[in-house]
Image (tube, grey):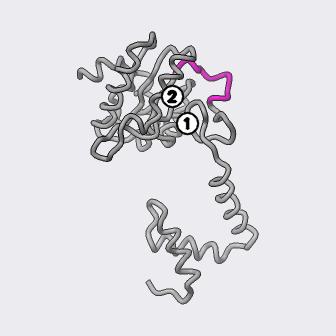
Amino acid sequence: MNFSSHLLENAVAEFAKLPGIGKKTALRLVLHLLKTEAAQVNHFADTIQKMRQEIRFCTRCHNVADGPLCNICATPARRHDLVCVVESIRDVMAIEGTQQYNGAYHVLGGVISPLDGIGPDQLQIESLLQRVQEQQVSEIIFALNPNIQGDTTIYFIQKKLAAYPVKVTAISRGIAFGGELEYADELTLARSLQNRQPVETLVRG
């Protein structure tokens, strides 16, 4: 791809670094910005910069937040005795999209994967145990991707939770093994939450 401007070429290269954006799509986006009024482009750039500089992570559940607590943890109407354990922030958004869950969340920030060099100490597991110990948590719901890494993580945390009087369940296998929560349709995900089962059944099955 030949460019008559190094500035244009550099901008295309930066956009192409985004996931799912190829060189042609990046070029189309950059050319669109060139035709857009300068004030709108400046607002776009300022918004991205402000997000990157000022966004925080919830001190309770590790979801994205504007302050110490995310909007979910700060809402009294939510059932904070229910804690849905997920791998990533994208999974929170996927479950929220079902509008069928009114509890709280806990974002692990990944799953146990020795092959990728990810162990329990690199995840937000200790803070989950601390929540169970310090707060009135009645149920932990595991909503991790149904694969080997997800099941390994559930098994590890379940053993840690055995010392606490808390119900431990996992979403049902409405989602195919090897699938990902963020790509599941909302109806399937909602039913998986509603039909959750004891973790012992999942692990033994």
Residue sitting at the far bottom: 4
Left or right? Give the position of 124 relative to 114.
Answer: right
Residue 49 marker: none
Indicate the secondary structure of the residue bearing disc 2.
Answer: helix
> What percent of the width, then of the height, locates residue 144?
39, 33
Tell me, yes or no, whether the two marked residues, 2 and 1, touch with CB atoms within 8 Å: yes
Indicate the secondary structure of the residue bearing disc 1.
Answer: loop
Query: Mark 2 — residue?
Result: 127
The chief SS type of the magenta part is loop
Quadrant for the C terminus, please: top left
Report the amino acid beneath label 1: His
Residue sitting at the far right: 39
Quarter assignment of residue 39: bottom right
- How packed mark 1 is, by other alpha carbons closer than 10 Å (few <14, some 14-19, many 20 or more), is many
User: Residue visible at 67% across and 29% down?
Assistant: 74
> What percent of the width, then of the height, locates residue 122?
42, 39
Residue sitting at the far left: 205
> What percent of the width, then of the height, locates residue 199?
34, 20
Q: Which residues are magenta?
A: 73-82
Which sits earlier in the primary sequence, circle 2 or circle 1?
A: 1
Which residue is at the front of the view, 97 or 43? Answer: 43
Left or right? Give the position of 67 relative to 96.
Answer: right
